Amino acid sequence: MIRVALVDDQFVVRAGFRVVMEMADDIEVVGECGDGRSAVELVERVRPDVVCMDVRMPGGDGLTATREILGRARGTRPAILVVTTFDLDEYVFGALEAGASGFVLKDTAPDDLVDAVRRLADGYGLVDQAVTRRVITEFARRKATRGGDTRSRGLLTERELDIVRLLAQGMSNVEIAENLVIEASTVKSHLGRVMTKIGVRDRLQTVVWAYRNGVVTP
């Protein structure tokens, strides 16, 4: 069962999300609140697998809450799915840089929202299709962080680095496997080890890490 927490300042929005989530047999809503500060306390108390997080809320915004939740987490960190009416670049990039695993708009179809929660719970990050290309293009334009995470990068083998580079191009496991002439299961195993080494929980944050640390050059 996937444990989900809902964070949004509008009660009617939370109620709608709860109805959508609880229609799925494999999802359980374990808590909800209406601001970022309460979200940090809620996550520590109920330990959800996925947090559906609004961005703009009185009493603490979602991006700040995301940073604090992930920074304070012990053991397996929850996946943060930012759900908002805003698709402005500053919110998309801010969410990803804060450590969010995914970003979708509030007008996303119910089935797509449930699918997003499932994907994040399985370790697959995602961004709403309406903004995916813009996000990846912007990350590609950005310069690598000076110095970067050289310690973690040094732990990766050449094969793992090759896989990360292809992942950053938007390739699936099957496409990466075909490109490198290996099995898709081998790609999945390599990516699991990569995420453990660099300290991220999903594919999307692996791509963010790759751009930040010069593994993929703009």
Image (tube, rainbow, N blue to C red):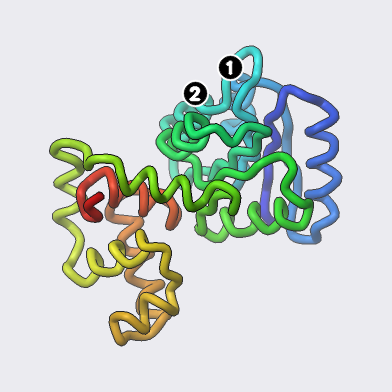
Circle 2: element type: helix
Question: Is the Cβ of the residue at disc 2 closer than 8 Å to that at disc 1?
Answer: yes
Residue placed most toward the observer, 62 or 42: 62
| Residue type at numbered disc 2 | Thr
Mark 2 lies on residue: 64
Quadrant of the rendering where the N terminus is positioned: bottom right
Identify the residue at horizontal 29%, vertical 40% (top origin): 142
Q: Where does the image place residue 38, in percent across and percent down from the top left?
A: 63, 21
| Residue type at numbered disc 1 | Gly
Q: Where does the image place residue 205, in percent across and percent down from the top left?
A: 40, 49
Q: Where does the image place residue 217, in percent across and percent down from the top left?
A: 22, 52
Q: Position of 74 compared to 154: left or right?
A: right
Image: 188 above or below 50: below
Image: 31 above or below 109: above
Mark 1 lies on residue: 60
Identify the residue at horizontal 59%, vertical 59% (top origin): 119
Q: Position of 67 compared to 129: left or right?
A: left
Q: CA distance from mark 2 to mark 1?
A: 7 Å
Q: Position of 8 compared to 73: left or right?
A: right
Q: Quadrant of residue 2?
A: bottom right
Identify the residue at horizontal 32%, vertical 64% (top origin): 193
